[in-house]
Image (tube, grey):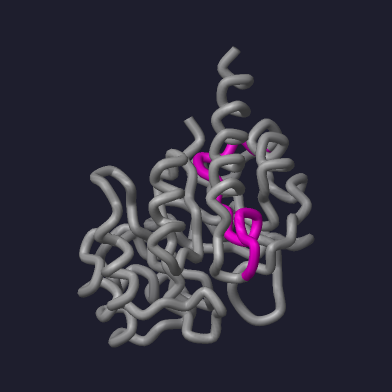
């Protein structure tokens, strides 16, 4: 089963739509320069809508200890996602499960990267962008080596139309979507969320045949 993460949520109705559609994780962006930014207090209010077994994920970019702790205080059961220039030591300081994002470009050594971040629960693969965060663009999936880490999260420009192909080709542990289910930055569409989750489930069903 391919797990589903819907990222960049800012509204109650979008959290409810993601849960109803079958998302396994909900992402909150704690990077103040992002248009999807939410404060820890806002994330805590939104996370109250999550049922058991739906995981809140907090996205951080080069955060200070104070910023990380504020997020963890608001969401003690949060999975941390590092999306900046963090070193393995920077990531390990949180003493809790985390994901590490990798910008996939020609020449990038994913095997070495995964080895250095061996304490990460998964490596999230995204397209390179100027600055930080996702850019809503698909990267070349052929850049993923067959001997990469077993827990890979496929991200970058996914939507209901292409996620099935991504699952068939990459066989990721999870998929992550943000702009592919939006009508504008930070504003999700319940219909697009449901279409995306349905496409993931169809792809899984086809692979199991």
Name the residue nearer the viewer: 176 or 113: 176
Q: How many marks?
A: 0
Q: Residue furthest top?
A: 209
Name the residue nearer the viewer: 15 or 92: 15
Residue located 33% across and 47% down the image: 54
Instruction: Return the x and y of residue 140 as percentages of the image width and height.
Output: 78, 52
Residue located 59% across and 63% down the image: 102
Q: Is residue 135 left or right of residue 188?
A: right
Whether residue 12 is in magenta: the answer is: no
Asked which quadrant contains residue 208, the reply is: top right
Residue located 27% across and 68% down the image: 45
Instruction: Return the x and y of residue 184 as percentages of the image width and height.
Output: 64, 68
Instruction: Return the x and y of residue 13 as percentages of the image width and height.
Output: 42, 58
Q: Is residue 74 left or right of residue 177?
A: left
Instruction: Return the x and y of residue 40 as percentages of the image width and height.
Output: 31, 77
Whether residue 174 is in magenta: the answer is: yes
Question: In which quadrant of the rendered image does the C terminus lie?
Answer: top right
Asked which quadrant contains residue 132, the reply is: bottom right
Name the residue nearer the viewer: 131 or 146: 131
Residue located 50% across and 60% down the image: 7
User: What is the span of residues highlighted in magenta in the rendered image?
Assistant: 170-184
Q: Is residue 148 left or right of residue 165?
A: left
């Amino acid at each position: 089963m391919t797990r589903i993460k819907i990222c960049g949520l800012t509204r109650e109705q979008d959290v409810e739509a993601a849960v109803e559609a079958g998302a396994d994780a909900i992402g909150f962006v704690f990077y103040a320069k992002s248009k999807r930014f939410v404060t820890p207090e806002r994330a805590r209010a939104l996370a109250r809508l999550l049922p058991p077994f739906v995981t809140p994920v907090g996205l951080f970019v080069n955060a200070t200890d104070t910023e990380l702790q504020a997020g963890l205080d608001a969401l003690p059961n949060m999975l941390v996602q590092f999306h900046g220039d963090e070193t393995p030591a920077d990531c390990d300081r949180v003493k809790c499960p985390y994901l590490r994002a990798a910008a996939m470009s020609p020449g990038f050594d994913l095997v070495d990267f995964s080895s250095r971040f061996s304490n990460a629960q998964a490596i999230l693969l995204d397209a390179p962008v100027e600055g930080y965060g996702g850019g809503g663009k698909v990267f070349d999936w052929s850049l993923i080596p067959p001997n990469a880490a077993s827990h890979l999260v496929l991200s970058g420009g996914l939507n209901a139309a292409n996620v099935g192909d991504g699952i068939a080709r990459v066989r990721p542990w999870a998929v992550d979507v943000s702009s592919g289910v939006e009508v504008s930055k930070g504003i999700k569409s319940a219909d697009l969320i449901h279409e995306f989750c349905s496409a993931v489930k169809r792809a899984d069903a086809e692979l199991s045949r």
